[in-house]
Each structure stands twice: as structure tokens, then as C-alpha cells.
Image: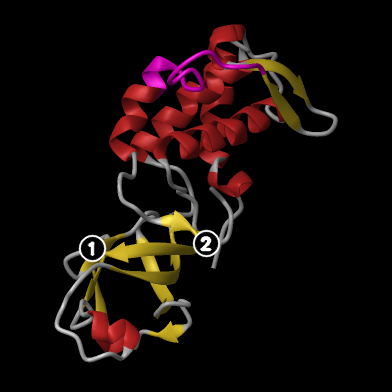
Amino acid sequence: MSVTVEQFVEPVVANVIGLLRMMAGSHLKTDDDRVELCAIEAYEIICEFCNRRFHLDTYEEIYKVMDGYIEMRNIPIVQINSIKRGTTLSTDVETDEYYVLGDRIKFTGLTNVAFLTGEDVDESRPFDVLVNYDAGTTVATGKLLSALERQALGLYHQIPTEGVAQINTGDRNIIRASFKVGEGKLMENAVQTASSLVYTGDGRSYSGYD
């Protein structure tokens, strides 16, 4: 269950082209590949800033269970495919041992060390789980759409502070310039919009998209 990043940013591309046509006249081609490249690059920059992904896809991540629940990194949750626990993260957590509560997964009776090791101990402590799940949406909307539009527009104009050194439509990539400090990758107005979307939990990728 997934969509491509290209599909996810289609509204961004359409809106940015509309803005550019208003600014520069109707001569702008609606199939300008540079706009899509900038929208894709804007998405990657914002994902990095927000420490999460937004497009519908299957994700596999490690979480530390604290107080019996975990806060998921990529939302909305569509479905849980599997949860593993134990020292090697290879033992199945059964479906009756957890439930989805909004953007969280709540575990029932899994907070004891004995659950992890099989040892008869009373001490409770956090433990790790490996979650494979489907999450995200099919297209960008709301605050994310607004942030993507602002960032993509800035990239299209190759504003130096955005770090764009060159746009290559032939091999479909953007060469980034070096950045100096802090939030240099994001335009200030995009930062303001995207800040509310930042994931602050401890979930981390198991399959390498970080």
C-alpha cells in the first residue's frame, strides 16, 4: 500500500505552476519538469526537518515502549502489519496485546522485563519493539501543502539561501549548495508552517530512510 513521492506532490506542482504563471505570465509551460523536481526536493527537505515522512507507504521502525505506549512517527496510521519484540526483535506481539489509539499504539501487559526475557522478575523498564505499518496520505494537504509550496517556489527561483546551486532536468536532480547554520535548508515561512509537523518521539527507521 503506497504512493510515489511524485504522486504525493502533484498538488504542489499544480499550485506552484499556477503561482508562477500569475507572477511571470501565461508563457510558463505547465509541464515544466523543474517545478516537479523542486517539489520533490522540497518534500525531502521538509521530511528531514520534520524527522518523519508524510506520503502513504509501508514503514518499519524501532520504538521504545514507555508507560505502555508508543507515539508513531508517520501518521495517520492506516494499518499495523506486524510488531516484533524481544532482544532480537523477532518475537511476534499478538494482536490482542496492543491496540491503536489515534496516533499511538497502546500495549497491554507488555511492560515487564519478564515479557522480554522469560525470566521471573518484578522490575519494569522500557523495552524496544519493531513495528511494520502502513501510514501517510495519498497527496499533500493542509499545512504540509502550504510549506511545500513555499519551499518549492523558493527552490524554483534558486534563492541562494535555499542552497540550490543548480537544477539539472536531464538527469532529474538538484545540486545543493553548502549550508551555513541551523535551518538554512528551509525558507523562513516554510519553517513557520512546518514546525507544527515536527516529530519529537524516539521512533527511528529500521530500513534506512533516515
Residue 183 located within the stretch drawn in magenta: yes
- Residue closest to the far right: 170
Residue visible at 42% across and 70% down in the picture: 131
Estimate how packed mark 1 is, as few (under 14), some (14 to 19) or many (20 or more) residues with alpha carbons within 10 Å.
few
Q: What stretch is highlighted in magenta?
A: 177-190
* Mark 1 → mark 2, Cα distance in angstroms: 22 Å
Q: How many labels does the image show?
A: 2
Q: Nearer the viewer, residue 113 or 73?
A: 113
> What is the magenta segment's predominant secondary structure?
loop
Estimate how packed mark 2 is, as few (under 14), some (14 to 19) or many (20 or more) residues with alpha carbons within 10 Å.
some
Give the secondary structure at mark 2.
loop
Q: Nearer the viewer, residue 120 or 76?
A: 120
Residue 158 horizontal side relative to residue 86, left or right? right
Q: Would you name the residue on which mark 1 appears?
A: 102
**Residue 194 visible in rendering:** yes
Q: Which colour scheme is used?
A: secondary structure
Q: Would you name the residue on which mark 2 appears?
A: 206
The residue type indicated by label 1 comes to Gly
Residue visible at 33% across and 27% down in the picture: 193
Relative to 47, is 18 above or below? above
**Residue 32 visible in rendering:** no
Residue visible at 38% across and 56% down in the picture: 203
In front: label 1 or label 2: 2
- The image quadrant that residue 42 belongs to is top right
The spot of residue 44 in percent (x, y) is: 55, 37
Quarter containing the N terminus: bottom right
Relative to 51, is 206 above or below? below
The spot of residue 139 in percent (x, y) is: 48, 48
Residue 90 horizontal side relative to residue 169, left or right? left
